[in-house]
Image: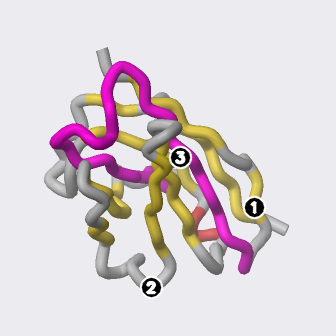
């Protein structure tokens, strides 16, 4: 059974960089899957932000691409989201998941709330 767990700060100041880490257990991130970050702003639906594949290739939402990067640490079975220059509009519940931009997120973490505020 694959399990994912998000970790990171719950509060970030505007203009700072948000970094969230997803720790995966029960499966390796170097297996043949995509590993993804998604978010849900208040009152809105889920938004795909970007993915990293089992081989380390990354894909990003075009609207977030200039501010987003995803890296990984295969020794720890973790992948990390970096979102630069955050604004209050980046306030959301952030999830990591197994799956791609198509929404096939059968395995997903419980989510972590991030608030951008000074």
Q: Which residue bears the numbered disc 2?
A: 66
Which residue sits at x=36%, y=80%?
63
Which badge, 3 or 2, comes first in the chain's sequence? 2
Tell me which corner region of the image, top left, top right, bottom left or bottom right, holds residue 116.
bottom right
Q: Which residue bears the numbered disc 3?
A: 93
The x and y percentages for residue 80 are: 51, 53
User: Count of labels shown?
Assistant: 3
Residue 15, compared with residue 56, is above or below; it is below
Which residue sits at x=39%, y=52%?
38
| Labels 1 and 2 touching (C-beta < 8 A) | no
* 97 drawn magenta: no
Extreme residue in the top direction: 1
Q: Residues within 10 Å of mark 1 (few under 14, many from 20)?
A: many
Q: Which residue bears the numbered disc 1?
A: 12
The region drawn magenta spans: 15-41
Q: Residues within 10 Å of mark 3 (few under 14, many from 20)?
A: some
Q: CA distance from mark 1 to mark 3?
A: 13 Å
Which residue sits at x=31%, y=47%?
35
The x and y percentages for residue 111 are: 51, 36
């Amino acid at each position: 059974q694959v399990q994912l767990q998000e970790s990171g700060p719950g509060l970030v100041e505007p203009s700072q960089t948000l970094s969230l880490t997803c720790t995966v257990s029960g499966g390796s991130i170097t297996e043949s899957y995509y590993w993804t970050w998604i978010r849900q702003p208040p009152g809105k639906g889920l938004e795909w932000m970007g993915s990293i594949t089992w081989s380390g290739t990354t894909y990003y939402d075009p609207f977030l691409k200039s501010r987003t990067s995803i890296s990984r640490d295969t020794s720890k079975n973790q992948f990390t989201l970096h979102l630069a220059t955050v604004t209050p509009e980046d306030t959301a519940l952030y999830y990591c998941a197994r799956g791609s931009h198509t929404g096939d997120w059968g395995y997903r973490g419980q989510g972590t709330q991030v608030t951008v505020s000074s």
